[in-house]
Image: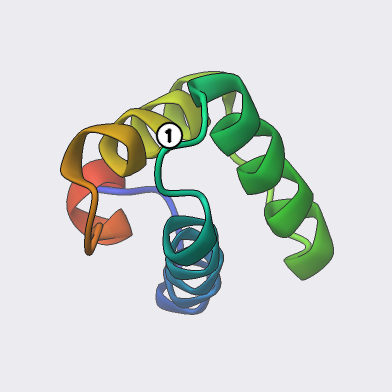
Amino acid sequence: MTNHSKDELTAVQAVVDRVTSWQDGATEGTVETELRKGLDEVGISLDDTEVGKLADAIQDQHGAVDATAILG
């Protein structure tokens, strides 16, 4: 189970959706950088492992990414 509240996960999902929509084909480093920027904008802090998991999913799935499933 995740240590993040429902509101936090909703905000993370919005960031993931935004990065996914315009980062198709970007390098993992770029995806991670953009995820961190988006998370900073919404005031959510994830550890490096969590950001890495989300970035990997964006790179691997090339489509909808369920942040709750990944962070859960």
Q: Is residue 11 above or below residue 1?
A: below
Name the colouring of the figure. rainbow
Residue 29 found in image quarter? top right
Of 38 and 27, the residue lying toward us: 27
- From the viewer's perspective, is 68 left or right of 24? left
At a point 22% along the width and 59% down the height, the residue shown is 63
For disc 1, the marked residue is: 55
- The secondary structure type at the circle numbered 1 is helix
Q: Is residue 43 above or below residue 26?
A: below
Residue 31 found in image quarter? top right
Disc 1 crowd rating (10 Å Cα; few below 14, some 14-19, many 20+) is many
At a point 53% along the width and 68% down the height, the residue shown is 18
- From the viewer's perspective, is 46 left or right of 21? right
Residue 1: percent from left, percent from top? 20, 47
The residue furthest front is 25
Amino acid marked by disc 1:
Ala
Q: Is residue 37 above or below residue 64?
A: above
Residue 55 found in image quarter? top left
At a point 49% along the width and 23% down the height, the residue shown is 28
- From the viewer's perspective, is 10 left or right of 33? left
- From the viewer's perspective, is 64 left or right of 36? left
Residue 3: percent from left, percent from top? 40, 48
Residue 47: percent from left, percent from top? 58, 28
Of 28 and 16, the residue lying toward us: 28
